[in-house]
Image: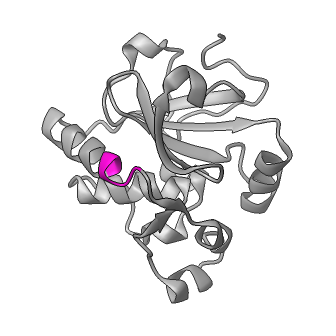
Amino acid sequence: MPWLQAPIALSPPGGGGCCIGPDAMQPADIIVSTTRTGKSGVIRAGTDSPVSHAALFDGGGMVIEAIGEGGVLRRGLAVALAEDVLAVVYRSPKITDGIASSIVAFAASQVGKSYDVLGAVLSVDPILCRVVGARTSTFFCSQLVLESYRRGGLPLTNAPSQCVPPAGVVD
């Protein structure tokens, strides 16, 4: 499987970065990705972004993610990335082992919850996403990642987690 190679360029906002393999990943690493599917294309067009999905690496070869076909799931990295044409891994320079454990523990505790289709659609509207508010009984992908980081003690943004589409996770 090609790793972090795709026809779409995506660089970290601060520059830097390098190609890595799965063995270099650590707990609570954030994976942003995209596929060639129509749904991915709609998300990318609606968010004006090269990515359409965000997920968390759990450190044990598994990914915790919220997807439309199953809700919040824990599944193998290879399965989670099987259709991706782009996958980029981000790691906060402020993360510690303890914070990473808390982030992964929160995300894991959400496994089995439903996917929030309405929340995903409203995430691009800065007013409506706030009106509807966070619904922690359901999640969409970037909301799960951001809420996991917030609950783990390392908030990545001041914006409400329900108001950030996938690319906003690493902006």
In the rendered view of the protein, which quadrant contains the N terminus? top right
Colour setup of the view: one colour
Percent position of residue 91, x then y: 37, 34
Q: Is 162 drawn above or below residue 50 in the view shown?
A: below
Residue at x-position 27% and y-position 46%: 103
- Residue 108 on the magenta span: yes
Q: What x and y, as percent, mark residue 24?
A: 38, 14
Question: Which residue range is magenta in the image?
Answer: 107-111
Q: Residue at x 53, y 36 (%)?
A: 12
Which residue is outermost to the left?
98
Q: Nearer the viewer, residue 10 or 78?
A: 78
Extreme residue toward the right, this view: 38
- Return the residue nearer the eye: 42 or 65: 65
The one of 117 and 14 positioned closer to us in this rendering: 117
Name the dominant secondary structure of the magenta segment: helix
Whether residue 137 is visible here, answered yes or no, is yes
On screen, residue 115 versus residue 41, left or right, reads left
Residue 161, above or below 68: below
The answer to whether residue 171 is seen in the rendering is no
- At 17% from the left and 33% from the top, the residue drawn is 97
